[in-house]
Image (spheres, rainbow, N blue to C red):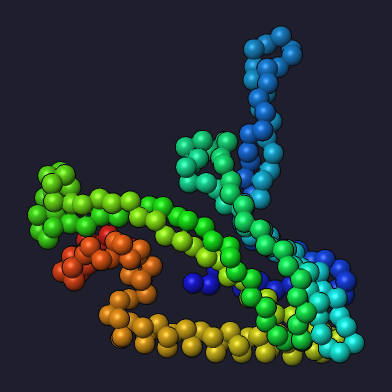
Amino acid sequence: HLLSEPSVLCTNNKEAEIYIGQTRSILTQGQQSTTGVSNIVNNYSREDIGLTLKVKPRLSSNNQVTLEVETKIEDLDPSSEQQADRPTTTKRTVKTNAIVKNGETIVLGGLIKRVGGQGKSKVPYLGEIPILGDLLFTQHSDVEREENVVIYLTPYIVRESGDLQKLKMMLSELEEVQERYNSLVRKELEEKTGISVEEANVPASRRIKQTPHQRNLSILNGEGA
């Protein structure tokens, strides 16, 4: 699914940066106060958690753009969630140079992250029995999936202010076309597979263990939300 669709206006041969995410306070050091009172003084640093994209374009005379691109994604490690003030972070970084024509798109991939979780499947009806149903008639399993972030980057050369207005109108029209296309693709996939888009986001290892009756029962019970 689409995470974000930002845009940035760059100057020739000058670096521009986009940051999408949140800033967290992380404990870096704790020390005792020197005032004679046994107080602990904590020092915190501010850490950006999210996506950082740096772009430096250079224009050439033949309507081409040389792009220096650096992408960094920083996430919180789920295993350190219990230590709210000292979380562990994971970083994924891609650096590349590319030469493209005006309006052409480059694709940055390989930003893969493994995400773990828990899935469960129930025996119809018996699995709904309070306490016993969860202990005897429900199968719990650890599931793992891969999340791959793909970035599409398209440069447009803006030589004067009028070109910028035309570009905004064109991008708005493309966004509407993309939304209609995505809607048609989702509908076609649901008709061919019988699986809704929401259900497709559930790991396959969890779906395979459930019969159609179990899936319907899970939806009625609100577990698929």
Residue placed most toward the observer, 191 or 46: 191
Q: Is residue 109 above or below residue 21?
A: below
**What residue is at 82 percent from the left and 66 percent from the top?**
15
Residue 154, quarter of the rendered image: bottom right
Q: Nearer the viewer, residue 186 or 211?
A: 211
Relative to the observer, which residue lies in front, 107 or 36? 107
Q: How many marks?
A: 0
Left or right: where 11 falls relative to 103? right
Identify the image quadrant of residue 102: bottom right
Identified at 57% across, 42% down, the residue is: 88
From this viewpoint, is residue 57 visible?
yes
Direction from residue 156 to residue 121 in the image, left or right: left
The C terminus - image quarter: bottom left
Q: Is residue 9 above or below residue 28?
A: below
Q: Position of residue 151 (x, y in %)?
A: 62, 71
Q: Is residue 136 above or below residue 15?
A: above
Q: Position of residue 108 (x, y in %)?
A: 64, 71
Q: Position of residue 53 (x, y in %)?
A: 70, 64
In the displayed structure, 16 sits above or below 89; it is below
